[in-house]
Image (tube, coloured by chain):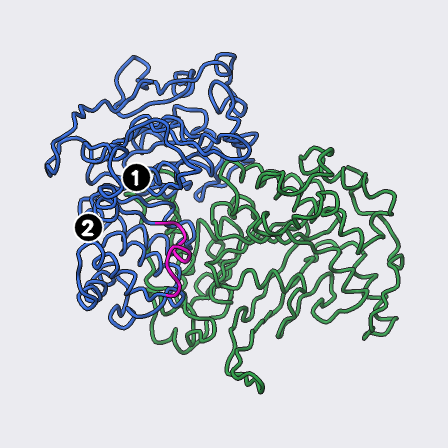
Chain colours: A blue, B green
Amino acid sequence: MTTIDKTSSVPAPRGSDDFGGPLLEVRDLHVEFHTRDGVAKAVNGVNYTVSAGETLAVLGESGSGKSVTAQAIMGILDMPPGRIPKGEIFFRGEDMLKMSADERRKIRGRKIAMIFQDALSSLNPVLSVGYQLGEMFRVHQGLSKKEAKAKAIELMDKVKIPAAKARVDDYPHQFSGGMRQRIMIAMALALEPDLIIADEPTTALDVTVQAQVMDLLAELQREYNMGLILITHDLGVVADVADKIAVMYAGRIVETAPVHELYKRPAHPYTKGLLDSIPRLDQKGQELYAIKGLPPNLTRIPSGCAFNPRCPMAQDICRTDIPALFPVTERDGGELPGRGSACHFWKETIHG
Amino acid sequence: MAELSKSNEPADATPNVSEVETVDAATESEAVAAIEAPVERGEPILQVRNLVKHFPLTQGILFKKQIGAVKAVDGVSFDLHQGETLGIVGESGCGKSTVAKLLMTLETATAGEVFYKGQDITKLSGRALKAVRRNIQMVFQDPYTSLNPRMTVGDIIGEPFDIHPEVAPKGDRRRKVQELLDVVGLNPEYINRYPHQFSGGQRQRIGIARGLALNPEIIICDEPVSALDVSVQAQVINLMEKLQDEFNLSYIFIAHDLSIVRHISDRVGVMYLGAMAEIGTDTQIYDHPTHPYTQALLSAVPVPDPESREGRERIILTGDVPSPANPPSGCRFRTRCWKAQDRCAEEVPLLAIPERFVGKDTPAAHESACHFAEEKDVVHAA
């Protein structure tokens, strides 16, 4: 397996704040679930890095393993049935998978925080939002109830919830969808983490509210210089906010690229198909291009390239050999930093 | 598919309906005849006039006292022609799904009329209503909950024939169902499978096949692809377009995804808080919007093109949609509008071609409910 982001990641000494490498590095991560129908291989060798202040978008359809990777990073994977047979997750140079439960608990929430998709089901309906926001401070910093509540109001102001003082004792159902998502963001931000993982943060929201929430997230990210992993299936949202993109399919990263490059010249047939299959707002097209077939069942991933049954370019080699993430170059061999494609025919895909 | 085109069953082949009939038999037969007849050329197949639906808010347990009403739909009018797709967009809570239910007569309208081939369906009952319902079918949003998990695909698609046996005689049903499966691109041999054996996209095809079973003229699609993956969405959209051409269907396509609505629609209506804000052809709405709400909505849509992210002007609305139980006076949008003036609080803007554009030959001359309508292209980067 050739990895693109070759980083000199010698584990840094403990507690060093000015660690030079990337904030987070995922290396050859595998996750599988043991079910009655067999072993579902949800993640099959994922590599990516995120630096401070950078936004990595992980793009994929349902079942592509994008959320499972995030859960493995957060350490909230259900184990069993989940299992991590292989792989490393370095946070500031330390492998989190080798840490004790206590050590991980100290990172979770304080250093890495997560924003979930469905705010209504992620918040406890029988506790006031002020109490839930304050919990971060009470548990991690040992503040008193009164101090925690004051902090909660401060946070609600920060995420621009109007009349924060009056609303701190309200319950989740009393807030609108957009406001609830702001509370989720406030909760993730509470301890000023270095890295935020946002799992489909705006999928359940209307477009006008989605724009508000994405703007807020981007603003706070700049302010705190946080790393952000944005997990989504929406190619539009990605284009608006991401710095670099990793496209996932059947538990593998099939293409990585800086955001402008990916949309201009996709180097993987799957990415190309996705881009062609979305209708555009600014032009009315003819019939949409449709990727034929369905995403594979994770207990029976096709041999060779997992995309081969749906791929218009598939040849015999695609059915036998798993393509590595090849570095993508210009036609004349000129380097394209940060680009990679797991396709035997990436040259034909990108250069036509 | 010759078999699937409208069968010329006589209207009175409908078996006797035993319910209490409120309309006398003569007028009812007339209504049924009008409904079964093909639509006159150039006439809209569906005319919606000032449709209103208020859900009462009550207080007290024994002596329920009405203290107000949620004005879910508050005066909506539009036309639908044969073979046309009308898209309806709007944020959640704007009343677009309630409009769908009213058109299906699943809810009774508080006021207003819905004319289907000249018959007001809000006042029909008995045989005439049944005939209308046969011709207006629906495809639902969530293919996971809208199919009964205990019924086989054959039973699901064949169930409409139990209610309308005139469409397919008993011995013929299995063949009909298999034909329908074939039409929507599923293997006819799957007839005995259960919904859980299918993926989301395939389930939505089953839902579409059920909608097609009675050879309807209008299909109301309430968010038909929003629960599907991107790569599968395109398959379903293409299928729906193909079926429209094949059976000359009219669609009312309700969605919150503006790009998909533009792709499939001939005309588009934008709803806000129970009322139509702007309506016109897809080019008029998307390239020449004149209502500030439409402009804000369009500018908020993330465009899958990173080049345009710096160049595009984005109008970010503040706040949330107000409660439909207590909508703002005058123009409903004024609380979030950057153009709002005193006049907007006093006068309700009518849905009409704005004065400044009347008689002008410009795409901006379409119906828009704003006192200060002004053309502004927000989709194409400057």
Work out whether A308 lies above or below A108.
above
Percent across and percent down for residue B147 are 65, 49
Residue at 78% of width from left, 54% of height from top?
Answer: B38
Please give the chain letter of the residue carrying mark 2.
A
Please give the chain letter of the residue carrying mark 1.
A
Number of residues whose C-alpha sits closer than 10 Å to that of mark 1, classed few (under 14), some (14–19) or many (20 or more): many
Quickly name the residue at label 1.
Answer: A242
User: Which element is circle 1 on?
Assistant: loop
Figure label count: 2
Work out whether A265 lies above or below A125.
above
Q: Is residue A125 magenta?
A: yes
Percent across and percent down for residue B284 are 49, 52
Percent across and percent down for residue A109 are 25, 49
| Type of amino acid at the residue the image marks with label 1 | Ala
Secondary structure mostly seen in magenta is loop
Residue A274 shown left or right of residue A163 in the figure: right
Number of residues whose C-alpha sits closer than 10 Å to that of mark 2, classed few (under 14), some (14–19) or many (20 or more): some
Per the rendered image, the range of residues in magenta is A116-126
Q: Nearer the viewer, mark 2 or mark 1?
A: 2
Q: Nearer the viewer, residue A200 or B245?
A: A200
User: Which element is circle 2 on?
Assistant: loop
Percent across and percent down for residue A170 are 33, 69
Q: Point out which mark residue A339 bears.
A: none
Quadrant hosting residue A17: top left
Asked if badges 2 and 1 are on one and the same chain, I answer yes
Quickly name the residue at label 2.
Answer: A192
Residue at 26% of width from left, 16% of height from top?
Answer: A334
Residue at 26% of width from left, 56% of height from top?
Answer: A186
Dot 2 or dot 1: first in sequence order is 2
Task: Look at the image and tell me in which quarter the C terminus of chain B lies.
Answer: top left
Residue A276 shown left or right of residue A77 in the figure: right
Quadrant hosting residue A269: top left
